[in-house]
Amino acid sequence: MNLPVSIDNLTKSYSDGMRRKRKILHGISLDVQPHEIFGFIGPNGAGKSTAINLVMGFTQPDAGTVKVNGLTPDQSQSRRFVGYLPEGPRFYENLTAEELLVFAAKASSMDVRTAKKAIDPLLDMLSILHVKKHHIKTYSKGMKQRIGLALALIHDPKILILDEPMSGLDPLGRNQLKRIIIDLKARGKTIFFSSHILNDVETLCDRIAVIHQGRILFCGETKDFSDTSGELENKFVNIIQATKEHHAIK
């Protein structure tokens, strides 16, 4: 059985501009199972977005492997299975939502007629149907986040990879997106997302991975991570702080 996302011993470094390399990921490994919601959490600079960029094939690893539905990211067929929402998505802002989604659908090999039938229900689900014919430059930050999610969903992918999907959303928007993610799982989708909002992770995720300084500190069921008080956030803060103190002593 092909896993939706499989990361094995993944290492990545970037030049610091002074002929030295800074290692961002130190041989991380994790698997995302079919039909689960998997949370990828860690502090700023932990390596979350770097790992997601490698999964999407935007950059190449120094070592290790990534597979998406059994295919490597450099195999174009792998993208048919994936809907992707980057952190801080950017668009051609002189397009309308409808024009943008038709373009995205065609890029995903959908015919225009099928795409146009899918657009209204999708925008309605995201509460932005009323601005379908408005230019994206007129959208608020939260509305742009919603149209970014619409782009990820337009071709009805099996796997969703979402980098900070709650960014820019107010509490009502976050609540709506959580309900959408739960519904997508019920429809058989697999969702892999990073987030700083640990309450949302605790509510939504079947399993999580905690990453800090490019290393996986925990990977397993969400319920197995919480501390004795049942608070995921407390355990998260404690494990990150303990790692910092360990490295400070060394």
Image (cartoon, helix red, strand yellow):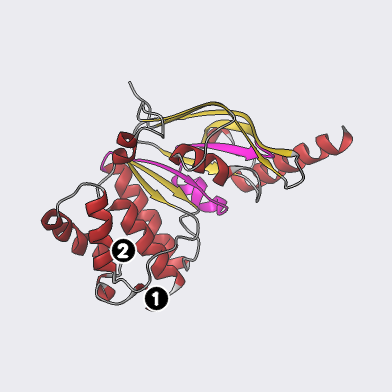
Name which residue lies at 28% across and 55% down: 104
- The residue depicted at 32 percent of the width and 56 percent of the height is 151
The N terminus appears in which quarter of the rendering?
top left
Which corner quadrant of the image does residue 157 belong to? top left
* Pointer 1 or 2: first along the chain: 2
- Whole-percent x and y of residue 69? 35, 30
| Most foreground residue, 220 or 135 | 135
* Number of disc labels: 2
Q: Quadrant of residue 97?
A: bottom left
Q: Which residue is mark 1?
A: 137
Q: CA distance from mark 1 to mark 2?
A: 18 Å
Which disc, if any, is residue 126? 2
Q: Quadrant of residue 115?
A: bottom left
Query: Closer to the observer: label 1 or label 2?
Result: 1
Mark 2 residue element: loop
Q: Position of residue 143 (x, y in %)?
A: 39, 69
Task: Residue at 46% x, 66% y: name it.
Answer: 169
* Image: magenta residue range: 187-214
